[in-house]
Image (cartoon, grey):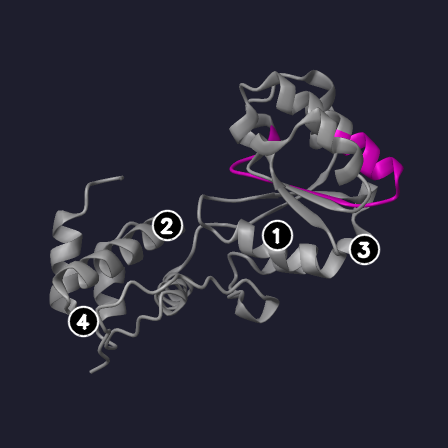
Amino acid sequence: MAVQLGFDLPVRTARGRDDFLIAPSNAMAVAMIENWRNWSGAKMVLSGPVGAGKTHLTHVWAQAADAKIIAAQDLRSEDVPTLAKSSVAIEDIPQISGDAEAQTALFHLHNMVLAEGHTLLLTGTGTVGHWGLQLPDLVSRLQGAMETTIDAPDDALLAAVLVKLLADRQLMPPPDVIPYLLKRMDRSFAEANRIVAALDHQSLVLKRPITRALAGQVLDNLPQGG
């Protein structure tokens, strides 16, 4: 049985291309990202559920395209000219649904990046029409972009994601833990992240390895939808 030591080790999230787990739910998105040089209009919207792998795929693209990555909520108008000197990925655009300044900055960044001959990747949950943006010119430009979606995971992918999340935290539970978690957890990447974080925390607190018994305790005490 694999044993974890009681040290608070750093989480080393692997975000290289070879670390991205490909399944039917995300294969089309991976193909579109890898074909980034042929994007119509030099821009792409990448959408999908929270924790589905958008950030990982964004890093894969940024490395290939030599692009910068910025969270939408960190956008400021004064930073646009510098950002527009290369290709750019803007993450979590729905987060600026109530921020007129950030939306204006994104509008100008969109125009300047494309004018400079570079490429844009824009990410969020759901379609552009559900991002809650109020700037009509920005909405029309984003709705004119190609779009690819990462769907919710099937069991095989969710199992692989759990294994990867545990490995990112240097955790190697025995083989019976993953099937046990799959039978009891909600079917989402966000829930996989939440459960693995809780398992890691409880293992450290109790100074016990992660076992099926410990997993049961964690799931029994995990707040619903937290």
Q: CA distance from mark 3 to mark 1?
A: 15 Å
Q: Which mark is residue 209?
A: 4
Residue linked to disc 1: 58
220 within the magenta span: no
Q: Is residue 35 visible?
A: no
Crowd tier of the residue under label 3, counting other residues whose Cα lies within 10 Å: few below 14, some 14–19, many 20 or above: few
- Is residue 114 a member of the stretch shown in magenta? yes
Q: Which amino acid lies under the numbered mark 4 shown in the image of this protein?
A: Pro
Please say if 163 is above or below 191.
below
Marks 1 and 2, the one that precedes in the sequence: 1
- Which numbered mark, 2 or 4, is in the foreground of this view? 4
Answer with mark 2 or mark 4, whichever residue precedes in sequence.
Answer: 2
User: Mark 4, mark 1: which one is toward the viewer?
Assistant: 4
Q: At x 21% / y 69%, what residue is drawn?
A: 6
Q: Residues within 10 Å of mark 1 (few under 14, many from 20)?
A: many
The residue beneath circle 2 is: 188
Residue in the image at 63% along x and 59% along y: 60
Separation (CA) of disc 1 from disc 2? 19 Å
* Contact check, label 1 and label 2, Cβ < 8 Å: no
Q: Is residue 202 visible?
A: yes
The stretch of residues the image draws in magenta is 109-128
